[in-house]
Image (cartoon, helix red, strand yellow):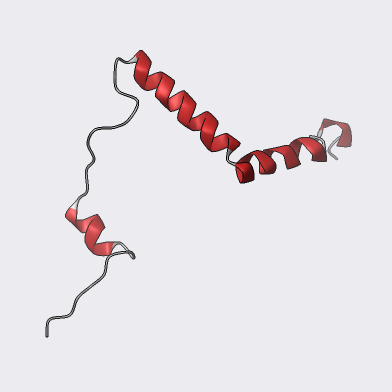
Amino acid sequence: MTDPAAAPSPHRVDSGARWHDTGITAKIHDALRDRAREQEGRDTEPTAGVIDSQSVKGAHTVLVLQPQ
C-alpha cells in the first residue's frame, strides 16, 4: 500500500491547475523559449513557418468550397 504521507498535498496539485488556468505555465514556457533562442543568437520570435499541403487539406479548420 502507498504511504499517504508520500503523496503530494492537494494544495500543491491544485496550484498546478491554477497556474495553468491563469496562464502562468504558458508565460514560463514562453520566457524559457525566448531565453533559449537568445542564447543561440536567434531572434525570440520565429521568422518562418512551414505548412505542408497534406496537413492543410486535412485540417478541420479549412473551408472546402464545392465547385458550382
The N terminus is located in which quarter? top right
Which residue occupies the extreme left position in the image? Answer: 68
Look at the picture and state if 12 lies above or below 36: below
**Residue drawn at x 79%, y 34% as measured from the top left:** 8
Q: Quadrant of residue 13?
A: top right
In the depicted structure, whether residue 68 falls above or below residue 18? below
Residue in the image at 24% along x and 33% along y: 47
**Residue situated in front as seen by the camera: 43 or 66:** 43
The vertical placement of 12 against 59, above or below, is above
Tell which residue pokes out farthest to the bottom in this image.
Answer: 68
Q: Is residue 61 left or right of residue 9?
A: left
Residue 30: image location, x then y, percent? 46, 31
User: Which of the pair 54/68 is nearer the observer?
Assistant: 68
Q: Is residue 3 above or below residue 54?
A: above
Residue 65 % position (x, y): 19, 75
| Residue 52, horizontal then vertical, whole percent | 20, 50
